[in-house]
Amino acid sequence: MFSEKDILKALSKVIHPASGTDIVTLGMVKEIVSGDDGISLVLTPEKSNDPFISSVKSTIVKTIKEILGPDAAIADIKIEPKVIVGKQHEKKREVLPEVKNIIAVSSGKGGVGKTTIAVNLAIALARQGFSVGLLDADVFGPSVPKMFHAEDYRPEIRQENNADIIVPMTKHGVKVLSTGFFVDPSDAVIWRGPMASSFLKQLIMQGDWGALDFLLVDLPPGTSDIHLTLVQEVPVTGAIVVTTPQEVAVADAIKGISMFRSEKIDVPVLGLVENMSWFTPAELPLNKYYIFGKEGGKNLSEKMNVPLLGQIPLVQSIREGSDNGEPVALNDSITGNAFMELASAVVERTEQRNRDQRPTLKLEITK
């Protein structure tokens, strides 16, 4: 068995991602019991729906073994949220009051380069003089930090009217927030749907987004709780659906378009982006090889009456830029210009949508 003092010393190395302070100093450790079957803990987070609890618990298990030795084991961790009697509810902060356009970037399936499109589109819009934010809502597989070479970045948390405000990272002229800024890159994010949705709400409502022309939201593949949470929390101006020419990707893109167009969601689809349209080798820049099929996105746009906003080729520089944190949209290259043209098409479609259609309403869920 281990002494309470030694256990507390070990727990003082466990940092809560949101505050940057250890859980002992935060007063989260309510009870410690060390027995033959291991160490049992009772934690009291400030918020009953703290989205970081899973991450904190896994860090505790790892830290206890690292500091107290391989024989130290966690038998149980119970969560008892703090109850503050008589506390008055703070007035809710208005959600994104200075954001003009909220654009959801979606895909019917994974692997079509949705995040690559979202990141380069955000940078291209910023290069055109717009104020831009990028919210990485792909909670379970956040890859935006890597594309901005910011895997180790941790946002500043400041206080405003007794509320925590999360300050986005600003890079390449884009304000960025991601789940990946709050968890270890090597840790799997194992959250149930309600916890993931709660975290997304925090990034939306507590993010210090300020005045933006465009806030792009990089959604998870498919259709999920995250999509519903977004349309419930904010009025989404429109959606962009990303696909490849491949038939299986096109079939899933149809589902994504249908979801946004459904009577319940009712979010205008601004258009379709066909990624990996053709392969062009660096040594043969004028050659096109249709590895994933030809004009699948174009045919889908005609079938679903959705504008084709752009076709992005499959070239080595896009992959290299994504991997090394220097997206191709930063450069005046053939691929960089393709994203600049995409940005111009998105701006034009957004202006047309705002001119011809009523503002989108938040989805109201009634029982």
Image (cartoon, grey):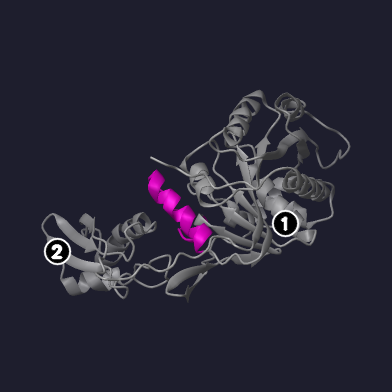
Q: Which quarter of the rendering shows the C terminus?
A: top left
Q: Amino acid at mark 2?
A: Val
Rendering coords of residue 19 (x, y %): 42, 70
Q: Is 11 or 282 nearer to us in this picture?
A: 11
Q: Earlier in the sequence, mark 1 or mark 2?
A: 2
Rendering coords of residue 227 (x, y %): 52, 43
358 w.r.t. 35: above or below: above
Quarter residue 124 falls in: bottom right
At x 34% / y 58%, what residue is drawn? 53
Magenta run includes residue 80: no
Q: Is 101 or 46 nearer to us in this picture?
A: 101
79 w.r.t. 110: above or below: below
Magenta stretch bounds:
180-206
Q: Residue furthest left?
A: 36
Q: Which secondary structure lies at badge 2?
A: strand
Determine which of the numbered discs, if any, sits on residue 278 in the image.
none
Disc 1 versus disc 2: distance between alpha carbons? 52 Å
**Badge nearest the viewer, 1 or 2:** 1
Rendering coords of residue 261 (x, y %): 61, 34
Mark 2 packing: few (<14 Cα in 10 Å), some, or many (20+)?
some
Determine which of the numbered discs, if any, sits on residue 123 in the image.
1
At x 82% / y 47%, what residue is drawn? 341
- The residue that mark 2 highlights is 33
104 w.r.t. 145: above or below: above
Answer left or right for 202 relative to 96: left
Magenta run includes residue 203: yes
Is residue 188 visible in this depiction of the protein?
no
Rendering coords of residue 207 (x, y %): 53, 64
Mark 1 packing: few (<14 Cα in 10 Å), some, or many (20+)?
many
